[in-house]
Amino acid sequence: MAADVVASPDSEPLRLIWCGRLSSEKRVFAAVEAVSLVPDCTLDIYGDGQLAASLRKTVESAGLSGRIRLHGPVDHEKCLTAMRSSDVMLFTSFGFETQGLVLLEAAAMSLPTIYCDPALSETVPAAGGILAADPSPAALGAAIRLVTENRAKLKEMSDIVSAHPDIPRQSLQTKKILAIYNSLVGDLPA
């Protein structure tokens, strides 16, 4: 069942969330740089990994500690609760993910997504997120800016994601796979 997400008031900064393993293929530094380009937003980062120390140093040396908060490793329930308290999922992986479990969790929490890998569009409901023009921090920043400057767009995306609560359900995916299987073997003799 989808969770109710309460968007931040238009007068408050946009609340972005990033969840995942702090490793190079997840591109967390692209998220930090993108957020640094847009003053009217915050970013909460949940996760741990080999880049944790250098990420903390980067955030502190850039003077972004007031807008970018590093929460470290948390249990699954706390991460989902944090998603419910956010406005948008920022998903920076590119050319690496085959599905993006975090995208499915965001959809289950009725959370729109800003992402940069067109291969992941099948996981984000049409118009329930923003596909950045390319994977660069500048393009991700432009997508963030679009939402910070147009909160009606955020509401629109949230409503669309909320209308598709079954996207992450395994039963729905199993039903699709069985339909494909049956269509392929339906004409074969028993």
Image: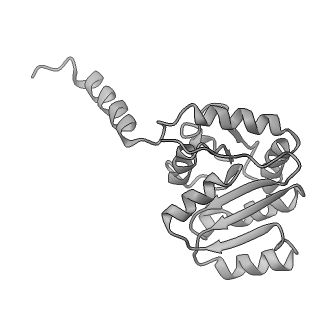
Residue at image coords 72%, 76% = 55
Front-most of residues 150 and 77: 77
What percent of the width, then of the height, locates residue 126? 62, 31
Residue at image coords 67%, 38% = 158
What percent of the width, then of the height, locates residue 23? 60, 70
Residue at image coords 69%, 72% = 70
Number of marks in the rendered image? 0
Front-most of residues 39 and 26: 39
What percent of the width, then of the height, locates residue 146? 84, 42
Front-most of residues 55 and 152: 152
Instruction: Relative to 47, say whether 2 is above or below.
Output: above
Front-most of residues 37 and 156: 156
What percent of the width, then of the height, locates residue 7? 73, 46
**71 relative position to 147: left or right:** left
From the image, which quarter does the C terminus lie in?
top left
Residue at image coords 82%, 52% = 141
**8 relative position to 178: left or right:** right
Instruction: Pick out the residue farthest to the top.
Output: 187
